[in-house]
Amino acid sequence: MIVCVAVVGQQNNPLYIQSFTEAEDDLKLHHIVHCSLDVVDERVNNPKRSGSTLNETFLGLLYPTENYKVYGYLTNTKVKFILVTTDLDVRDADVRNFFRRFHSAYVDAVSNPFHVPGKKITSRTFAERVSNIVKSFRLSSSG
Amino acid sequence: MEEYPEELRTPPVSLVAVVGCPELHAPISTHLHSEHPPINTLALPDLSSNTIASLLPPSSSSSSRSVDDSSSSSASPPVGGILKRDWLLKHRTRVPSVLAALFPSDRISGDPAQWLQVSTDLEYLKAALRGRNIKLVVVVVHSDSTDGINEDRMVAFRKRAEVESKHLISFVLSDASELKQSLERLGSTFAELANAYYRDEGRRIKARIEKKSFSSIELYIRYCFKVAVYAEFRRDWVEALRYYEDGYHGLREMIGMSTRLPAVQRLVEIKSVAEQISFKISTLLLHGGKVTEAVTWFRRHNACYKKLVGIPEVDFLHWDWMSRQYLVFAELLETSFMAGQSTLPAVLGTAEKPLSEWEFLPAFYYQFAAQYLKEKRFSLERELSMMEAVCLDDNSESVVSYVFVGQYARLVEQGDEFALQLLTDEEYIHHALLEGKRFQDSFEIIALLKKSYESYTNLKIPRMASYCAFQMAKEYFAVGDLSNAKKLLDSIAKLYRQEGWVNLLWETLGYLRECSRKQEILEDFVEYSLEMAALPVSSGGVTKSTCRECGPAGPATMSRREVIQKEVFEFVNGKSDLAPTEDANSPRISKDLPLCIEIDLVSPLRVALLASVAFHEQIVKPDLPTLLTVSLLSQLPQTVEIDELEVQFNQSQCNFIIYSAQRHQSAVASNSLPKSRVEVTRALALSANRWLRLSYDVKSGQSGKLECISVIARIGPHFTICCRTESPASMDELPLWKFEDRVETFPTKDPALTFSGQKTIQVEEPDAMVELSLGASGPALVGESFILPVKVTSIGHAIFCGELKINLVDARGGGLVSPREIEPFSMDNHHVELLGIARPEGEDEPQRGADNIRKIQQSFGLVSVPFMNSGDSWSCNLEIKWHRPKLVVVYISLGYSPHCNESTAKVHVHRSLQIEGKSAITISHHVMLPYRRDPLLLSRIRPVPDSDQLISLPLNEKSILIVTAKNCTEVPLQLLSISVEKDDDECERSCCVQHESEGLIFSPLLVPGEEFKKFFSIIPEVNSSKLRMGMVCLRWRRYLEPKEHSGTFSKGVGVLTKHKLPNATVELSPLIVKLECPPYACIGDPFAFFITIQNQTQLLQEIKYSLADSQSFVLSGSHNDIIFLLPKSEHAICHKLVPLVSGLQQLPRVTVTSVRCAAGFQPSVPASSIFVYPTKPNIEMSWSATEEA
């Protein structure tokens, strides 16, 4: 189950962060997303070691916490997408697919002429789309 | 890791026992210990005592054996546990693999009584070792190499000992080398035998595993463990690893199957054993440098047991256990990296199961250890609080560790002895809770987090480090170590501020605020509160106020922000205390305890109050008002009422205070208004995200920079916020809020001012009340002394310490000196020169000292201006001379102070004038031959190619020099004289130059553009190829109208302009042709036309001539002829011509050719023209009159 998704800006500032849990662990998820930026930095600076190929937007599993798995995705404009899930066994393909859809939702959101680049994404449509993507991910991964 | 027993932590070392000859034990054990691999020695002093019996307790060994052996029989009691607690220790310290008995040689070779004793000892040893696999070695100690024992006795001894001959070792003490050899012999034998022992033991147990001759899974695990340990003794790491893993898997199967113990204790036992085995496996893997495998192993171990929480009452035990797993692995990893046994692998994990780089950092595991420990504490506290009700008392029951790993039992007194009694689960839980209560987990957690934090910091992983620091700070906060907590929180708040993680920052600030509240640091408390209240926390959703995650800040919501703001403003207004409790000592803002907060350009509190200040102009005249807009912005959720606002400048006399109307009334009433300027506005209320704009006039009397430094807001009687002002043009965006999607407005009403407005303004110096006028304009003429009158007229200011600076600057850039044209005279180095500064004639200068004119250089001058009262004037003349035509700008600046004291700012007046220096006169010249007299100049007809094009002049013949002087200025000039002078360096005249007419009788006036011509005749007297004709000297001056001021331009002798005439060649002409005819003719009136040819050579000249017919004339005489001219003679050819046509007519063309010179001559068209009148003109009179004159 996806518990949290986030869009993080170029200055590592959160642009959009949404958790999908019942419990009150927002803060913890914020911490997890924030910490995962360290791994993103490391991956970007040391692309060889993590075995990922160059120019790959999907950064893979960033780091395992005891209960969560954190995946990352880096766009060309250095905007990061972070996904926190509680599923222990997730197929990479599913995550990639998720990020691809998430990315296109993001692109649509920032293409809005009323959106100022670099500001938080407050679009309700975007939030709806994201929650739909999250829901469909849940279905596909459980199915 | 420290809590594990020593024998578990270190790799097993073989153990041998030495008995007899105690004096040798020390060197032997030292030697064995230094062996590679080392061997531990168990030294038993002598055989006779019962030390052997005590150290090799047959009972324990046999009992364990009996348990093991009896396992196959069904009658045996069920197995009590998995691993015996002291089994490993026993093998490490008590059960030797080899027993070496040392016998002095003299006792063997001694008398029968001694021999008997030896035999007894041997029997005793054999008896002790019976039933065990322990190898026996007998050592015969020779005190010197010579004391031989006879062969029979040795054989008998060996047989008695029942050892192979190679296990009978002789040990020679006689000298060092022998001793060394003996020790080495001993060492190798021991190593070999020990190896054999452990191999045999291992094999024996392995056989049981293979035969599956065990009754329960516990035994299987135990056997695996033992085999692995024996393999470790032999340093067979591969086998050890394999059997440890087998044991581990066996253990995993046991979960849920075993019913031997009560459920809780069963799990505890399994986990304890799993912990030990896992520890062994991790150690072995890491020692082998297999980091990736170790990490993967740990992951699996973790995954296996993570879910085995057990019943909720004792879940703290599970968390404790989990925490220990992480801690131990972290320590192992750390030591392994430190010892350099392992390095980070190049590729992490495998493609399918990638490991993240974090999993190789000990910090990662420390962090989790801390996290689980926190979990444990949480569970424990929960349990304890529940138990409080049930009254948890220590009923002094002594619970001790049982013989098996992971089991506990109660020590029960039974008469004189103690017996161990297994516990029920309830008792065990009770015991565990009591144990748990004894530990202070917070410090442990802090220590773990600190390790993690330091490691992350060293590795430059800032966000992880911050997270650890945050958790650490929370622990510190919980245990009441506020200063440490604050230090950590301050550092991480910085990161969160920078990256804009508002929720995290909110949480951090919440703790900080609470820390400063508890520490009673008022300033910090107010600052943190203000920052929190101004954070862009927008979620208006109602969240549960009591959630476990929330710190003292409460949930990050808008309403909470409002509460915080309200709280802090009540506090700063002195309405409430710092602490919410009714503590009388709690500090309160009051007259004795005022509070001032500074907000500078980098302060995080800019979100709470931002002051932007813009002058509407960039430059202002002194004492003139200029508009200043003070704009304040606050992101605090509720409106802030400011009582007064003080605006401070670097020129303090400009400071002013703005009161809100209400406050002003009360201030007026109490008569407490300050002396500085006061403005009143309707209300000073700051609502969220809306600029409060206030515009006022500011007046400064002091020239220079006027800067608005700060705006001080006073809220309540004792609280002030001092806000450094910012220019709107260079203002940074609000931190944190810049990421928010909010309406952004301009600090000033005029958006243009927002982009250009500055908080500084330049105050100009006061207007000069002095007129500086320059009385002349160009152009100046090269060579003359150009007079530039300067007049200083005071029209309001008195002039003190006046100073006039003059600067001459080339208008086209570049200096006034040309480096290329080095002139012989230093004076000429400057093309334009300031000659002097003079008072105009007639105005006598009061002689007030020599420093009047202070300095004059070629292009710079400095003159002091005397004191003048208002209305006075003073003037001087600048004398400037141009040596070359050049455009020059004259800068004149007058500096003075309008008041008599020197300190006041000087006022400056600047004037500049562009003056062009022009050449006044251009002189040109022209050389001609006399009319109708043409000497033959050979160089003219046959120019020598390489000769420079000099003018050729005939020797001793008169040539005419025409000098033309043209006025190229725009003013009339007066010529004073014109003459041709010889060159300065010419010693003798080589030609005669005469004025053709008289000298200048009156000075002719040349209007602009007019030319003046003057004729000179030149007769070269020397035959020279380079005749210097001399130099034309022309004196002139500006023409002055009589009414013009006589002093403006110097009259004097005028300006001399020179023009050098070119050199000429002089040559003797061989022939001279003259044409002679009357000046005019009349139709039908015949006249004579002579052609005279003069031979100037010493040779006979053959001359051909021809005369062409002309339609205008009838002529007599031959058309062609050849004549021979004698030397130095002349011949005239005469023709009579009758004109037929009137007007200017061409005479018949004459062509004269000299055969010798090969030169032909034809007169020029003007020379061969004549005017023919129709009738005789009546001009006799005038002609005669001219002749008479």
Image (tube, coloured by chain):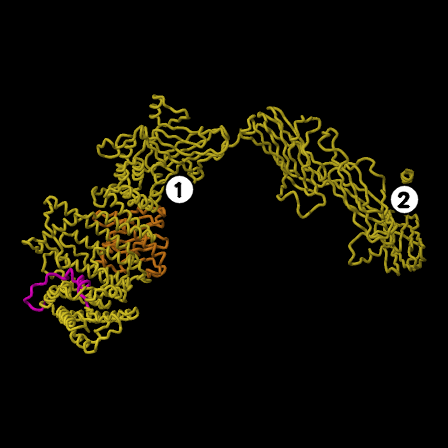
Chain colours: A orange, B yellow
Quadrant containing the C terminus of chain B in the rendered view? top right
Q: Identify the residue under disc 1.
A: B732
Subunit of label 1: B
Q: Identify the residue under disc 2.
A: B1175
**Within the magenta stretch, is there residue B273?**
no
The one nearer the camera, B546 or B36, is B36
Determine whether, in the image, residue B1096 is placed left or right of residue B848.
right
> Looking at the picture, which amino acid does disc 2 mark?
Thr
Report the residue at 91% width, 48% height from top: B1084
The one nearer the camera, B4 or B943, is B4
In the structure shown, which secondary structural element does the residue marked by tag 1 occupy? loop
What span is colored magenta in the figure? Answer: B71-97
Q: Is residue A98 above or below residue B186?
A: above
Name which quarter of the figure residue B893 lies in. Answer: top right
Name which quarter of the figure residue B616 lies in. Answer: top left
Query: Residue B941 placed where, x, y %?
Result: 82, 57
> Looking at the picture, which amino acid does disc 1 mark?
Asp
User: Can you see residue B930?
Assistant: no
Subunit of label 2: B
Query: Residue B456 placed where, x, y %?
Result: 31, 52
The one nearer the camera, A26 or B491, is B491
The one nearer the camera, A58 or B113, is B113
User: Can you see residue B133?
Assistant: yes
